[in-house]
C-alpha cells in the first residue's frame, strides 16, 4: 500500500501562494489565447492555404506558441522543494505539491 506523503514543513506564505496561483491563471490565459490563434490559423489555411507566406507565417506562429508555452510552463517551481510545477500539472495547479506534499491553498483575496 502506498501512503500519502505527509508534509511537515511550514505552509506556504501568502505571497508564495499568490505567486503560484498567478502562474496558474497565466497558463489558463495563455492556453486560451493559443487555442484561439490555432483556430484562427486553421480558418486562414482554409481560405488562403495555397499562399506560401500564409503557410510560413502560420508555421512560425505555432512554433513561437510552443516555445512560449514551454517557457511559461516550466518557469514556475514549488516554493518549498523547488520541483517544477509544469511537470505536475499541464494547466491547473494540483491541490498540493506532488514532490514534497506542501498544500497549495487558493488565496482568499484574489484580485
Ligand atoms: Zn514541493
Image: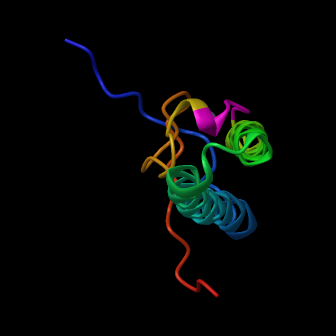
Q: Position of residue 68 (x, y in %)?
A: 77, 44
> Does 85 sit above or below residue 54?
above
Query: Looking at the image, which is closer to me, 38 or 83?
Result: 38
Q: Is residue 51 left or right of residue 101?
A: right
Query: Which residues are drawn in magenta?
Result: 81-86
Identified at 72% across, 62% down, the residue is: 19
> Does 58 sit above or below residue 84?
below
Q: Position of residue 75 (x, y in %)?
A: 78, 41
Q: Position of residue 23 (x, y in %)?
A: 67, 58
Q: Residue furthest left?
A: 1
Q: Position of residue 67 (x, y in %)?
A: 77, 37
Query: Looking at the image, which is closer to me, 48 or 57?
Result: 48
Residue 102 falls in image quadrant:
top right
Is most of the magenta stretch helix, strand or loop?
loop
Taking the image as drawn, is residue 9 in sight? Answer: yes
Q: Residue furthest front?
A: 50
Taking the image as drawn, is residue 31 in sight? Answer: no
Instruction: Please say whether residue 65 is one of the residues in the magenta stretch.
Output: no
Identified at 69% across, 32% down, the residue is: 81
Which quarter of the rendered picture does the C terminus lie within? bottom right
Identified at 51% across, 58% down, the residue is: 43
Which quarter of the rendered picture does the N terminus lie within? top left
Question: In terms of image quarters, where does ligand 1 lie?
Answer: top right
Q: Is residue 18 left or right of residue 52?
A: left
Amino acid at each position: 500500500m502506498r501512503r500519502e506523503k505527509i508534509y511537515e514543513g511550514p505552509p506556504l506564505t501568502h505571497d508564495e501562494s499568490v505567486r503560484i496561483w498567478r502562474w496558474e491563471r497565466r497558463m489558463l490565459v495563455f492556453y486560451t489565447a493559443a487555442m484561439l490563434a490555432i483556430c484562427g490559423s486553421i480558418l486562414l489555411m482554409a481560405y488562403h492555404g495555397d499562399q506560401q507566406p500564409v503557410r510560413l507565417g502560420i508555421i512560425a506562429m505555432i512554433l513561437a506558441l510552443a516555445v512560449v508555452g514551454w517557457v511559461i510552463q516550466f518557469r514556475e517551481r514549488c516554493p518549498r522543494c523547488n520541483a517544477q510545477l509544469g511537470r505536475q500539472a499541464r494547466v491547473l495547479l494540483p491541490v498540493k505539491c506532488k514532490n514534497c506534499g506542501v498544500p497549495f491553498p487558493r488565496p482568499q483575496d484574489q484580485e
